[in-house]
């Protein structure tokens, strides 16, 4: 088991990285066989790299444009962060739906991984409630969601409890928890993230930000182009000067002199 620690607001949490890698590899390379899977991999990667354009990231990237940006879906006047997705009033009715969908997704997977006749749908649901909590707003489920939103990660202790609860081998437990993480991401994206994106676009349109963003992006691209051209010209002049100083270039033609064989060769 590959473990390391990730810092949260209050303490360091041990992470089972094998679960994260298993999830990512499900959609990489030859496994990425559709546009839908391709975009899902991009979403997972952005979540993992903490590049999902939530409010705090938008403020870092373009502070002039998003200096007044707050959560576009609630009236709490709060900064949009990963933690705010949990407490946002607009999402309160959605989290129990997400939890139920996750459990529905996991029941047949667990039955396939452990085909014991005792693993009925009811018993599996009860066991899932043991590790995720019986309610969407208890600490177990909240902590799972926060860590999953932070960067597609699962606590090592959570992994150990899952392995013991379902009586799975290490490899099968990794498959199970990668599926759990994947299910969470799919339903979070569908029920919370996409409506949030629509609300953000509406917020931008109301403030005529979309046109300003396009102009700013064009300006940034032109700056990069000119800087790149300047650097290329500078390097070219330096190369010519070096060749000239070392008698490797003809001062009349400007062409590189061919290497001559030494006398007596």
Image (tube, rainbow, N blue to C red):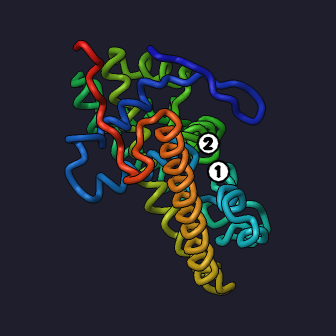
* Left or right: 186 as drawn, with respect to 206: left
User: Which circle's residue, 1 or 2, is located before the other in the chain?
Assistant: 1
Tag 1 secondary structure: helix
Q: Dot 1, how many residues are within 10 Å of its Cα: few (below 14), some (14-19), or many (20+)?
A: some
Position of the C terminus, as image quadrant, is top left
* Left or right: 98 as drawn, with respect to 255: right
- The residue carrying mark 2 is 146
Tag 2 secondary structure: helix
> Dots 1 and 2: beta carbons under 8 Å?
yes
Label annotation for residue 82: 1
What is the quadrant of residue 57 in the picture?
A: bottom right
Position of the N terminus, as image quadrant, is top left
Q: Position of residue 206 (x, y in %)?
A: 65, 86
Q: Which residue is rendered at x = 77% and y = 31% of the image?
A: 10
Q: Which residue is rendered at x = 52% and y = 30% of the image?
A: 154
Q: Which residue is rendered at x = 52% and y = 56% of the image?
A: 233
């Amino acid at each position: 088991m590959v473990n390391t620690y990730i810092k949260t607001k209050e303490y360091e949490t041990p992470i089972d990285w094998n679960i994260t890698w298993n999830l990512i590899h499900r959609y990489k390379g030859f496994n990425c066989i559709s546009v839908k899977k391709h975009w899902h991999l991009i979403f997972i990667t952005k979540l993992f790299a903490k590049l999902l354009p939530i409010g705090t990231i938008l403020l870092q990237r373009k502070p002039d444009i998003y200096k007044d940006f707050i959560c576009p879906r609630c009236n709490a006047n709060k900064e949009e962060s990963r933690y705010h997705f949990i407490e946002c009033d607009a999402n309160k009715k959605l989290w129990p739906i997400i939890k139920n969908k996750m459990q529905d997704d996991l029941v047949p997977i667990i039955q396939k991984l452990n085909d014991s006749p005792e693993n009925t749908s009811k018993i599996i649901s009860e066991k899932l409630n043991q590790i995720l909590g019986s309610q969407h707003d208890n600490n177990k489920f909240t902590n799972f969601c926060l860590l999953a939103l932070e960067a597609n990660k699962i606590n090592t202790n959570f992994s150990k409890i899952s392995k013991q609860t379902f009586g799975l081998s290490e490899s099968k437990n990794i498959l199970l928890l990668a599926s759990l993480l994947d299910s969470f991401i799919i339903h979070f994206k569908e029920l919370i993230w996409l409506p949030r994106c629509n609300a953000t676009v509406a917020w931008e349109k109301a403030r005529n930000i979309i046109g300003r963003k396009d102009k700013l992006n064009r300006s940034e691209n032109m700056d990069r182009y000119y800087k790149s051209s300047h650097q290329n010209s500078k390097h070219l002049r330096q190369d010519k000067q070096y060749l000239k100083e070392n008698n490797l270039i003809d001062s009349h033609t400007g062409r590189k002199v061919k290497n001559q064989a030494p006398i007596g060769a």
